[in-house]
Image (cartoon, helix red, strand yellow):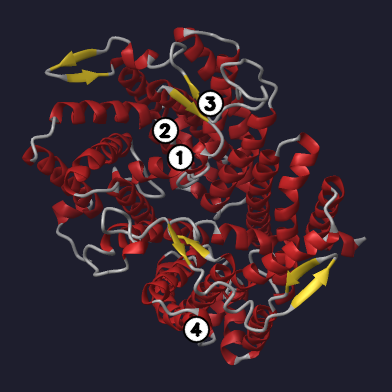
């Protein structure tokens, strides 16, 4: 397909998605919906999911492709949350403990994952997907058998096995969202979460300007030159996977505090897919991604997800937004998969 | 010892199954009955995976799309009210052209994503699920005229979550009704279903020996050499995908006629995962699988499927653990197979680079 230069620059899929979002907002205005709450919700969702999308960036930059194994990091973060909750740590300290434990677990997990991916080159995405599935289902057994005894976490009947969703109400529910939060013209800004997202984004940006970051990206884009310069891409790929897994762990802790619930069992199974769709909608490819892709993609896709349900329910009965999400998300991933090697 | 090692996967699984049977104290008659039903209804879906493996496409996660074709046909047959074996035959006939179309689309997609067929197939299944929901949840009854009220959601459009297939239930299983009395229970023996499965097995074996089958085998060994030898690789890849998709649609229909209800929005979702896990349990790999392995896999995997919740209950007093465990086993088996496959091709590529 031949597309004029300017359009090509922005990327056709991105324009289509942006057009779809504009259409949804247009309908919202036309049907006199409360735009302010829609925008508030969108901003909250962007902050909530941002770090999980950011987590994909190091993997792409390190040559691992789209990190379908993100649930690995997510599970680490969830363990952090559960341990912190079980110990009954409240407020910001609980949040810190959860992310600290998550981070500590994600480093060995990321090393192992990177080691495995080094031995399964060319199939990283498939191996990542199924490794993620396997780990999530293994953890389902773990959540049932784990020796957590805090009565607020385990099933009331039997006293064993964690509940499927743990409420964070009164523990560290929305700790970050509320921190420095303010309201402008009816739009609430969850400052804390956004500040953390911005700070981590900045750190990742900075990291890819340090020596280590540059070698990671160089080993991906010019493996032969890198080897000639004495860079082992086995090493850089492991570094990339650790970074991605660690961000995934922090990402889910931030997600949970904003959402107000920790979701266990099968909930993390498919969490990688919307995040991947975000970064792709932002214009990333399987081999190249930038901070800009993360930001644009998260804002576009999360806004669509937020706005679609209330807007479409004005026009049609039934929840078409979930169907639309499936089509957009997976269509986007498919499109990216068919375009490798022809950019 | 070497033979033991080569068959370690099925042996391990066999041992796991035996352990479960002993722990849960499952009676042989119960197990036999369950297995007869499950192997009968799942085998065709597992067999549908063989041809793409031969052609070097790997595990066809896109059979979910074939299953959707089967379900579209099933809904139409119930809508028209054609009962019994006639209805089933009609569904089978209807599903075929739909599956061929879907197969061509999937095959073309695989050609665009060479080397990433498996992940593309998986995502294509999710994508197709979105389109399928759009069709059945929103288009049917609103854009597409549909007047069987009992099948529609209360809002007047969209198919209900479950469609009653009792009109075609056991149409094939009981075409020749045979009951086997075992320990006072009359076991239903689905003679014709097993006949169909046997026929597909023989046809697959025969297909492997045809000209096209040999071409696919050559492609599976080396795509590049095959192309140089004048084999139309791209076209054959599409053909292999179409055959797999059509078999999957038939397999899903056979599955549904046994179950008797269609979960409109869920019945197809797990089809790919369970069929693939079952095939791999037999020791098949991403690049090599035989008809015998498909059948052995069906038996082993579904034994574990029956046994594990019961064993979980007996061991830990909670059937839920067994349920989670069997899902974990399915995913883990696929993961290990994928890792081994990628590891081997990585190692051989490194060897080649060294020499």
Mark 2 is surrounded, within 10 Å at the Cα level, by few (under 14), some (14 to 19) or many (20 or more) other residues, namely many
For mark 1, give the secondary structure: loop
Q: Which image quarter is the N terminus of chain B in?
A: bottom right
What chain is tagged by disc 1? A
**Picture quarter containing residue B10?**
bottom right
For mark 4, give the secondary structure: helix
Does label 3 or label 2 sit earlier along the sequence? 2
What chain is tagged by disc 4? B
Give the foreground label among 1 and 2.
1
Q: Pick the residue in front: A259 or A107.
A: A259
Residue A111 x %, y %:
61, 34
- Mark-to-mark CA distance, 1 and 3: 13 Å
Give the foreground label among 2 and 4.
4
Q: Which residue is mark 1?
A: A271
Vertical comparison of A121 with B272: above or below: above
**Picture quarter containing residue A33?**
top left
Q: Which residue is mark 3?
A: A77
Does label 1 or label 2 sit earlier along the sequence? 2
**Image label count:** 4
Q: Which residue is mark 4?
A: B89
Mark 4 is surrounded, within 10 Å at the Cα level, by few (under 14), some (14 to 19) or many (20 or more) other residues, namely some
């Amino acid at each position: 397909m031949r597309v004029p230069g300017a359009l090509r620059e922005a990327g056709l899929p991105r324009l289509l998605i942006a057009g779809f979002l504009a259409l949804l907002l247009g309908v919202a205005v036309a049907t006199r919906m409360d735009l302010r709450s829609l925008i508030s919700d969108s901003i909250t969702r962007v902050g909530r999911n941002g770090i999980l999308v950011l987590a994909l960036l190091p993997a792409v930059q390190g040559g691992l492709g789209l990190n379908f194994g993100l649930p690995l990091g997510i599970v680490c973060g969830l363990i952090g949350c559960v341990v912190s909750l079980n110990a009954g740590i409240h407020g910001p300290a609980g949040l810190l403990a959860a992310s600290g434990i998550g981070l500590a677990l994600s480093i060995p997990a990321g090393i192992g994952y990177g080691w495995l991916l080094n031995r399964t080159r060319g199939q990283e995405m498939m191996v990542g997907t199924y490794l993620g599935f396997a780990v999530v289902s293994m953890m389902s057994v773990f959540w049932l058998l784990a020796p957590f005894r805090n009565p607020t976490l385990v099933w009331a009947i039997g006293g064993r096995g964690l509940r499927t969703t743990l409420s964070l109400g009164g523990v560290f529910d929305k700790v970050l969202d509320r921190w420095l939060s303010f309201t402008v013209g009816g739009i609430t800004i969850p400052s804390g979460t956004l500040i953390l997202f911005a700070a981590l984004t900045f750190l990742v940006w900075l990291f890819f300007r340090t020596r280590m970051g540059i070698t990671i990206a160089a080993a991906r884009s010019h493996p032969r030159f890198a080897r000639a310069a004495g860079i082992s891409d086995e090493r850089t790929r492991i570094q990339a996977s650790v970074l991605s897994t660690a961000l995934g762990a922090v990402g889910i802790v931030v997600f949970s505090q904003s959402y107000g619930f920790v979701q266990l069992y099968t909930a993390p199974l498919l969490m990688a897919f919307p995040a991947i769709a975000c970064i792709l909608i932002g214009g990333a490819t399987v081999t190249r991604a930038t901070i800009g892709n993360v930001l644009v993609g998260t804002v576009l896709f999360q806004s669509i997800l937020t706005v679609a349900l209330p807007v479409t329910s004005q026009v049609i009965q039934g929840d078409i937004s979930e169907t639309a999400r499936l089509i957009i998300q997976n269509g986007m991933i498919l499109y990216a998969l068919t375009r490798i090697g022809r950019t | 010892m070497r033979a033991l090692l080569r068959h370690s996967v099925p042996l391990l699984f066999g041992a796991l199954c035996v352990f479960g049977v002993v722990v849960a104290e499952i009676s042989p008659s119960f197990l036999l009955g369950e297995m007869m039903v499950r192997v009968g209804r799942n085998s065709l879906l597992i067999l549908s995976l063989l041809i793409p493996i031969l052609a070097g496409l790997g595990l066809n996660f896109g059979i979910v799309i074939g299953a959707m074709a089967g379900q579209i046909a099933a809904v139409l047959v119930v809508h028209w009210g054609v009962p019994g074996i006639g209805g089933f035959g009609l569904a089978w006939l209807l599903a075929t052209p739909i599956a061929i179309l879907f197969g061509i689309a999937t095959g073309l997609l695989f050609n665009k994503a060479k080397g990433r067929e498996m992940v593309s197939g998986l995502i294509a299944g999710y994508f197709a699920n979105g389109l399928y929901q759009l069709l059945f949840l929103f288009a049917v009854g609103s854009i597409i005229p549909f007047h069987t009220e009992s099948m529609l959601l209360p809002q007047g459009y969209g198919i209900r979550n479950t469609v009653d297939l009792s009109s075609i239930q056991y149409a094939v299983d009981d075409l020749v009704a045979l009951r086997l009395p075992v320990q006072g229970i009359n076991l239903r023996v689905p003679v014709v279903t097993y006949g169909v499965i046997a026929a597909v097995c023989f046809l697959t074996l025969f297909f492997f020996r045809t000209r096209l089958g040999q071409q696919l085998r050559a492609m599976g060994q080396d795509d590049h050499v095959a192309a140089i030898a004048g084999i139309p690789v791209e076209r054959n890849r599409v053909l292999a995908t179409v055959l797999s998709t059509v078999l999957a649609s038939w397999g899903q229909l056979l599955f549904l006629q046994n179950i008797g209800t269609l979960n409109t929005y869920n019945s197809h979702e797990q089809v790919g995962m369970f069929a693939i896990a079952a095939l791999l349990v037999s020791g098949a790999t991403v690049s090599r699988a035989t008809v015998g392995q498909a059948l052995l896999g069906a038996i082993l995997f579904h034994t574990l499927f029956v046994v594990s919740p019961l064993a979980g209950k007996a061991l830990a007093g909670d059937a839920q653990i067994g349920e989670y465990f069997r899902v974990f086993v399915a995913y883990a088996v696929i993961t290990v197979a994928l890792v081994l496959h990628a590891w081997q091709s990585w190692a051989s590529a490194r060897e080649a680079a060294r020499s």
